[in-house]
Amino acid sequence: MLVSSSSLTPFPPVWTADDTPPEDTIPSVFPELDQQLQPLPPCHDSAESMEVFKQHCQIAEEYHEVKKEIALLEQRKKELIAKLDQAEKEKVDAAELVREFEALTEENRTLKLAQSQCVEQLEKLRIQYQKRQGSS
């Protein structure tokens, strides 16, 4: 989201009525900018120099806004990556739960089969025992 230069107001200087920055604000017009990116003080006798200075201030303001937007987007990126990591972890957890459910279901089926076989075998043993009791 670039801001048009016509809507920008330089920070922190306050322009005077004749659109020239106060002398004492020129050395640190944009304190958060690297030294090599700082607007150079204009030559107050040259309209062209003053215009270049104003343009440089506008560009510095745009640069500042872009840097803020980049920082916000990087923060949002970190949040989305964390959210994605959490979703992937939950997906893995769900897959593990499905595998565990399938294993327990198979174990349950096996145990039910073993139980029915034991009940069947017990019934046969009872019948044999009753036959022995009846024949004695």
Image (tube, rainbow, N blue to C red):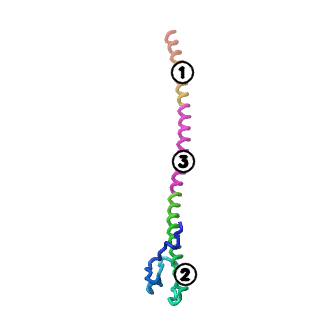
The image position of residue 16, as x and y in percent, is 43, 82
The image position of residue 68, as x and y in percent, is 50, 69
Q: The disc labelled 2 sits on which kind of residue?
A: Gln
Residue located beneath label 1 in the image: 120
Front residue of 57 and 108: 57
Q: Which mark is residue 34?
A: none
Q: The disc labelled 1 sits on which kind of residue?
A: Glu
Q: Residue furthest top?
A: 135
Helix, strand or loop at mark 2: helix
The image position of residue 121, as x and y in percent, is 54, 21
Sort mark 3 into few (<14), some (14-19) or many (20+) by Cα contacts within 10 Å.
few
Q: Earlier in the sequence, mark 3 or mark 2?
A: 2
Contact, mark 3 vs mark 2 (Cβ under 8 Å) = no
Residue 136 visible from this viewpoint: no
Question: What residue appears at the point 51 percent right and 53 percent down from the top-left corner?
Answer: 86
Q: The disc labelled 3 sits on which kind of residue?
A: Lys
> Does the segment drawn in magenta span residue 30?
no
Sort mark 1 into few (<14), some (14-19) or many (20+) by Cα contacts within 10 Å.
few
Residue located beneath label 3 in the image: 91
Which segment is the magenta one? 82-109
Q: Which mark is residue 36?
A: 2
Helix, strand or loop at mark 1: helix
Q: Residue furthest bottom?
A: 45
Give the Cα distance between marks 1 and 3.
Answer: 43 Å
